[in-house]
Amino acid sequence: SVAIVKKLKLIGTPLKVFKNTAFIKGMFNSITEVAAAEGASIRTVSGIRGQIKRPIKSPEGAFRATFEDKILLSDIVFLRAWYPVDIPQFYNPVTSLLLPHQQKTEWQGMKTVGQLRAERSIKPPQNPNSLYHPIEREPKRFNPLIIPRSLQKALPYKNKPKYTPKTSKKSSILSRPVSTMSKKEKKLVTLMQQIRTIEKDRQYKKKIEKEAQRKIYMKKKEAEENKRHRKIQERRQEYYRKIARAGRGK
C-alpha cells in the first residue's frame, strides 16, 4: 500500500514578540487546528527554527511558539507539512478471458484519461492558485550591531569598534581659497559693506521708534479704559442710590 500525500505550506506572522517566545497569528483558523499541530517544527524566512507550543484565546487560531533566537515583528513564519490525499477506489472486472478465442484478440479495454488527452492533444486543466509565481520582497534592513561596553573590554583590539572623530562641516580659514581682488573690486566690496551697515542701522532706529510709539499708544489706551471704567462705576452707584431712596419713601 502506498500513501499519497500533498505538500502543504502554512504561513503566519508574529502578533507579539518576547525574548525567545512569540505569539503567531494567521496560520490556523481554530484552536482545534492548532491542537492538531502541537509540537510541529516551524521556521522563519531568516532561518530561525522554532516549535508550536499551545493555542491562545484570542485571536482565533493564534498560538504560542518558542524559537532559537528572538524574531522580529516583520518576520514571516511558515510550517512545512504533508497532507494525505484520499484516492477513490475503482473496481472494473475484466471478463475478456471468458470470451471465445477469436473475440479475445479483438477486445479492447477502456482508454484512460491520459491516453484520450494524448490522442486529442488536450492539456490537463490547471488551477492558477497552484502555479508558482515570482515573489518580490523588499530588501530587509537590519539594525546596526551594537556591542555593550562591558563586552568591548574583553574583545581583542582588532575586533573592537573603532570610533573616528566627526569632521566639522564648516570649512576652516586655511582650507578656504585665497581671493585675489583688484583695487576697484575691493572698493566696490567696501562700499557694499558700508551700505549694508547704514541700512542695518536705519532699520534698528526705525524699530526703536516703533517701540516707543507703541508704548505711548498703550499708555493712552489704558488711560481711556480707566476713565471709561470709572464712569460705568459712577453710573452704577447713582442707579443703586435711586433704588435705595425709592425703597425708603414707600
Image: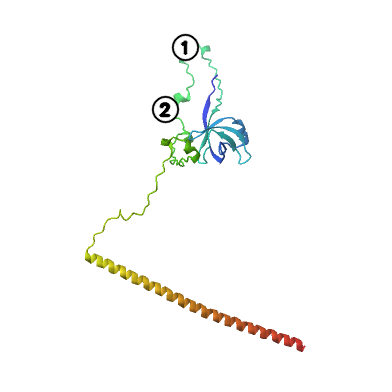
Q: Residues within 10 Å of mark 1 (few under 14, many from 20)?
A: few
Front position in the image: 141 or 160: 160
- Which amino acid type is marked by label 1? Gln
Residue 148 appears in the figure: no
Tag of residue 86: none
Residue 236 appears in the figure: yes
Compared with residue 73, is residue 121 higher up or lower down, i.e. above or below?
above
Quadrant assignment for the C terminus: bottom right
Q: Quadrant of residue 82?
A: top right
Q: Residue at x 49, y 41 (%)?
A: 149
Q: Is residue 123 left or right of residue 87?
A: left
Q: SS of the residue at dot 1?
A: helix
Q: Earlier in the sequence, mark 2 or mark 1?
A: 1
Q: CA distance from mark 2 to mark 1?
A: 30 Å
Q: Position of residue 125 (x, y in %)?
A: 46, 32
**Contact? badges 2 and 1 (CB < 8 Å):** no
Q: Residue at x 42, y 27 (%)?
A: 120
Q: Position of residue 151 (x, y in %)?
A: 49, 37
Q: Quadrant of residue 222?
A: bottom right
Q: Position of residue 234 (x, y in %)?
A: 64, 84
- Which amino acid type is marked by label 2? Arg
Quadrant assignment for the N terminus: top right
Look at mark 1 in the image and give the residue it sits on.
Answer: 102
Q: Position of residue 214 (x, y in %)?
A: 47, 76
| Residue placed furthest toward the right | 250
